[in-house]
């Protein structure tokens, strides 16, 4: 028991100590996601600059996987000391606005700022004419391809349509260049919805009609899923894609086990970095493809914004921090993993330097960004779709049956 | 057991080897991953012995220039210590008199109360988590150590009471009576007579309680949101779940999180076994 | 000062425990029942007064996804617990033999037990990895597997693989409990059976089995109740995928109440789960009672 007493004393001691440390500064608690877009180191450096410019401020950074981000924001709402700044995804403002989770910051954003930021980025933080934060990450999924592999298979130019992509993948497989030419993030998560949305937009599909009824189970929506299923059946898509998220796609592609991949901006710099990739220098980027007679390019709106939870006790400081992170100079300093939301940055030669190709792709991709539905019950709709897509990909159901079932579920959501 | 044929001996030793391998291999591999580079871990075909061994991941987690990774790991470690030790201390302080009461001063209604306590400990957390979350929110306790300490007491008090009760049953009653006649009260008897004898059982109960609190994930996930209260299991899940692909780093975090409970379990190996026994063999 | 009656003292000593049980478990449980009849919402406080009668329960019982999560949970419980019992008893019989290194092996058995559940889940997720996982590498390098498999990506194997990780962590518990019971068997007893010419099976059946049946059956129910709650290992390893094949009841309740914020409906699911585990707990208490009487 003597040992026990010592331990307890140590625990109480550190409790007191931590209490003292917390009292010194104004503390902000900020929630980000781990991996994809800005790296943790990037965000740490941005934050250090903010702390240096605002003495007495201490920003505590919290990094969680994307999959945990939504629930953390929701769960922290009832906490006395919740977050002061949160990163949120483009699909959540409808829900967060409906339940009053995020501060309405419409009157903090002036019209000059509005004009200087990409329109697609604004849609990330806007719901029903009101603004719930500042856009920070403007992102979409691009097509990455391994040029060396294509050359090896005698293919001179990358595909222009999804149909051509399948043809080229067949050639690559037949010539033994790579066993599974395609890799995607098709695990049962939001990632698969992003890939599906990209294909749906290419095939001219729609999620909901004007009356908000689900229509993804016919036309382009059905074609998109059939395309996915066929690519697995034909042995072109790496079957592990069904349990992959974006980081798995990056690793598979970077280790030279795929010729084509769909992924966010951040992979461009990492897949061409010899420390992270064994195919550095062979990686090219293009806008996600279109489909003959339907579209020229496709893209999903995968942007994210920074907002202030309504129960934050340091709203002014939180807004100052958000303004710092989203400011043009900061975003331009860290433009390797995530492109700025500012229009003018895209004409800045400093930004383009070394990633000209990415900017060319971004110009087309960002303009083609297709939104996922704005719905307060989006999380459930997405869950129903994820299940349907997985069931089809695993061969449990035909694409048609799976999507019809999902549509029935979605029709019953409010 | 006295006479064993050679074939039996061979069988016993090969089974023992197999068991040892099954127990050790996964943890050994976790350790190897923690000292390997990502390049070695993603090489095909997999090489079992890494080309280069580096402790970089451990350095990253344990210090390394105040990075976010180190800060969140170390504070989570501290939070886990605070929560597990406080909850255990409070639970024992509550459970000892309760167990004594059940053991020495039995009564029909009190006997059924013991079964209520055991049922409480076994109830699935989903049964009570929603109101608890709402209550903690109203009390302003979400994202504090106290919320987890309270909830863990709800699990540990019934458990340790039950464990200690069955042990107190084995201590002769006569020992209590002399001091009572001399005018001592029950608390004094517990402190001066029962506890000294029950020291090993108390150690076992404390050990089991610390291990349970150290391992708890569900409430910790829901009731905490940042480094002010987040415990180690949640921090590990945040490192490891989802997109994060730094195998070496999450393995190192796993190894470090495993050291305290494993060290404790070995340190008090006898207590652990006796704790498991009295918890399951007797009511 | 007058002497308090024994009964009064008894209740005083129990009071702190009762306060904690009522405050942290009893009252919340009643509140859960209340919530289950309302439209309570996680972040809109006023909704907890909106009475909806049996709507939540009717919806819950009619929900095919909930039913399949019950099915997944039952599979997980039956598979993992029966394997844990079987392995645990076999390992205990082995560890009860005399051989060199027995002490070391007994100490090793504690390792999985002390390893935190979340670390266990993460460790096995890495081992099961479809592309760089050690299991695939091992099985293909020794020739047991022709090509790499997606263990956690295939709905036909995912839940089994998760259960295997759980079995690895928890069979030592059964082994230690059984071993302790085995050590209570007197050597004379065994040798007498040996002299009577009993073969190994007869010895097990007439001497060993009666000694371990009670603690093992208690361990069985304990593990069943624990396995029925399973959440953390699923959260870290699969998050319910692929195609919801590893979604268990606890995960379903978590999603309903905390991701979709429907506390009222989540409470009704939770109560159905409670009823099922109440039946298990009742079995357990019966066992304990019977043992208390015979001991």
Image (cartoon, grey):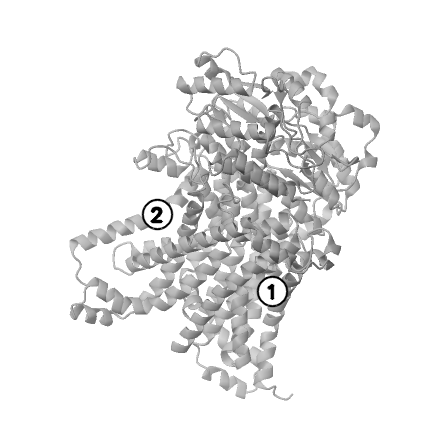
Left or right, A115 with respect to B188, comes to: right
Left or right, A355 with respect to C247, comes to: right
Picture coordinates of residue C11, whole percent (x, y): 59, 79
* Residue at which label 1 appears: C25
> Does B1 appear above or below A196?
below
Please give the name of the residue rendered at 54% of the width and 57% of the height, measured from the top-left corner. B213
Q: Which mark is residue B22?
A: 2
Mark 1 neighbour class, 10 Å CA radius: few under 14, some 14 to 19, many 20 or more: many
> Does A8 appear above or below A367?
below
Left or right, A219 with respect to A118, comes to: left
Mark 2 neighbour class, 10 Å CA radius: few under 14, some 14 to 19, many 20 or more: few
Which chain's residue wears label 2?
Answer: B
Q: Which mark is residue B172?
A: none
> Does A359 appear above or below A1?
above
Depth order, front residue of A34/C273: C273
Tell me the SS state at disc 1.
Answer: helix
């Amino acid at each position: 028991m003597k040992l026990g007493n010592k331990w307890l004393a140590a625990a109480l001691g550190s409790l007191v100590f931590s209490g003292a440390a917390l009292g010194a500064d104004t503390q902000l608690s900020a929630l980000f996601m781990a991996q994809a877009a800005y790296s943790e180191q990037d965000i740490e450096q941005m934050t250090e600059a903010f702390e240096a410019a605002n003495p007495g401020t201490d920003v505590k950074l919290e990094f969680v996987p994307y999959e945990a981000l939504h629930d953390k924001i929701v769960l922290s709402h009832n906490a006395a000391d919740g977050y002061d700044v949160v990163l949120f995804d483009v699909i959540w403002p409808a829900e967060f606005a409906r339940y009053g989770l995020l501060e309405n910051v419409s009157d903090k954003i002036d019209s000059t700022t509005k004009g200087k930021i990409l329109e697609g980025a604004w849609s990330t933080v806007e719901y029903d004419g009101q603004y719930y934060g500042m856009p920070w990450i403007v992102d979409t999924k691009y097509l990455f391809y391994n040029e060396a592999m294509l050359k090896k298979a005698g293919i001179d130019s990358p595909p222009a349509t999804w149909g051509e992509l399948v043809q080229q993948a067949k050639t690559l497989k037949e010539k033994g260049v790579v066993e599974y030419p395609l890799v995607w993030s098709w695990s049962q998560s939001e990632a698969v919805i992003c890939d599906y949305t990209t294909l749906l937009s290419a095939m001219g599909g729609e999620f909901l009609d004007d009356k908000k009824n689900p229509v993804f189970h016919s036309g382009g929506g059905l074609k998109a899923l059939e395309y996915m299923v066929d690519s697995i059946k034909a042995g072109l898509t790496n079957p592990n894609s069904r349990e992959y998220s974006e980081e798995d796609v990056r690793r598979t592609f970077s280790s030279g086990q795929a010729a084509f991949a769909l992924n966010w901006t951040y992979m461009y710099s990492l897949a061409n970095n010899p420390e992270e990739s064994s195919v550095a220098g062979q990686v090219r980027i293009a806008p996600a493809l279109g489909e003959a007679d339907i579209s020229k390019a496709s893209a999903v709106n995968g942007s994210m914004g920074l907002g202030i939870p309504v129960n934050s006790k340091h709203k002014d400081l939180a807004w100052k921090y958000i303004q710092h992170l989203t400011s043009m100079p900061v975003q331009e300093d860290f433009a390797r993993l995530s492109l700025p939301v500012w229009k003018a940055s895209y004409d800045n030669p400093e930004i383009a330097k070394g990633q000209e190709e990415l900017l060319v792709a971004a110009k087309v991709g960002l303009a083609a960004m297709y939104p996922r539905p704005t719905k307060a019950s989006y999380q459930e709709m997405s869950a129903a779709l994820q299940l349907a897509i997985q069931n089809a990909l695993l061969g449990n159901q035909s694409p048609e049956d799976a999507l019809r079932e999902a549509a029935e579920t979605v029709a019953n959501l409010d | 057991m006295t006479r064993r044929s050679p074939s039996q001996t061979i069988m016993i030793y090969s089974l023992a080897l197999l068991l040892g391998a099954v127990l050790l291999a996964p943890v050994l591999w976790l350790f190897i991953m923690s000292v390997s580079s990502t390049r070695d871990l993603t090489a095909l075909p997999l090489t079992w012995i890494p080309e280069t061994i580096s402790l970089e991941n451990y350095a990253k987690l344990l210090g390394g220039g105040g990075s976010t990774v180190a800060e969140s790991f170390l504070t989570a470690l501290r939070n886990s210590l605070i929560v597990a030790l406080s909850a255990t201390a409070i639970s024992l302080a509550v459970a000892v008199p309760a167990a004594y009461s059940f053991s020495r001063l039995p009564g029909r209604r009190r006997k059924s109360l013991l079964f209520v306590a055991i049922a409480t400990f076994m109830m699935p957390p989903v049964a009570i988590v929603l109101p608890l979350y709402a209550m903690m929110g109203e009390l302003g306790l979400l994202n504090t150590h106290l919320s987890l300490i309270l909830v863990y007491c709800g699990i540990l008090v019934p458990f340790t009471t039950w464990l200690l009760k069955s042990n107190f049953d084995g201590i002769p009653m006569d020992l209590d009576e002399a001091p009572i006649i001399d005018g001592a009260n029950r608390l004094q008897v517990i402190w001066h007579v029962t506890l000294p004898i029950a020291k090993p059982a108390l150690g076992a109960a404390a050990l089991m309680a610390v291990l349970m609190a150290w391992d708890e994930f569900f409430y910790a996930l829901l009731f905490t949101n940042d480094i002010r209260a987040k415990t180690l299991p949640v921090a590990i899940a945040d490192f490891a779940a989802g997109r994060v692909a730094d195998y070496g780093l999450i393995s190192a975090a796993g190894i470090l999180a495993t050291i305290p409970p494993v060290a404790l379990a070995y340190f008090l190996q006898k207590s652990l076994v006796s704790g498991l026994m009295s918890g399951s063999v007797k009511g | 000062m007058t002497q308090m009656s024994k009964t009064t003292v008894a209740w005083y000593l129990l009071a702190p425990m009762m306060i904690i049980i009522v405050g942290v478990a009893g009252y919340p449980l009643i509140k859960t029942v209340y919530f289950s009849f309302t439209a309570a919402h996680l972040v809109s406080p006023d909704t907890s007064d909106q009475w909806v009668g049996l709507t939540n329960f009717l919806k819950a019982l009619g929900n095919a996804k909930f039913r399949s999560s019950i099915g997944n949970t039952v599979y997980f419980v039956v598979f993992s617990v029966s394997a844990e019992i079987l392995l645990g008893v076999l390992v205990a019989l082995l560890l009860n033999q005399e051989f060199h290194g027995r002490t070391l092996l007994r100490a090793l058995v504690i390792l999985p037990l002390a390893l935190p559940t979340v670390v266990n889940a993460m460790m096995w997720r890495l081992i099961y990895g479809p592309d760089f996982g050690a299991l695939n590498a091992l099985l293909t390098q020794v020739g047991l597997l022709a090509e790499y498999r997606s263990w956690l990506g295939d709905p036909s194997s995912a839940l089994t693989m998760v259960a295997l990780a759980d079995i690895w962590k928890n069979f030592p518990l059964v082994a230690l409990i059984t071993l302790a019971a085995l050590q209570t068997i007197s050597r004379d007893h065994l040798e007498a059976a040996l002299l009577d010419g009993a073969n190994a099976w007869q010895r097990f059946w007439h001497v060993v089995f009666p000694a371990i049946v009670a603690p093992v059956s208690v361990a069985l129910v304990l593990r069943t109740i624990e396995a029925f709650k399973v959440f953390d290992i699923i959260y870290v390893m699969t998050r319910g995928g692929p195609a919801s094949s590893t979604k268990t009841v606890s995960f379903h309740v978590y999603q309903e109440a905390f991701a979709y914020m429907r506390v009222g409906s989540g409470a009704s699911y939770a109560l159905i789960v409670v009823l099922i585990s109440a039946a298990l707990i009742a079995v357990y208490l019966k066992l304990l009672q019977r043992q208390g009487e015979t001991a």
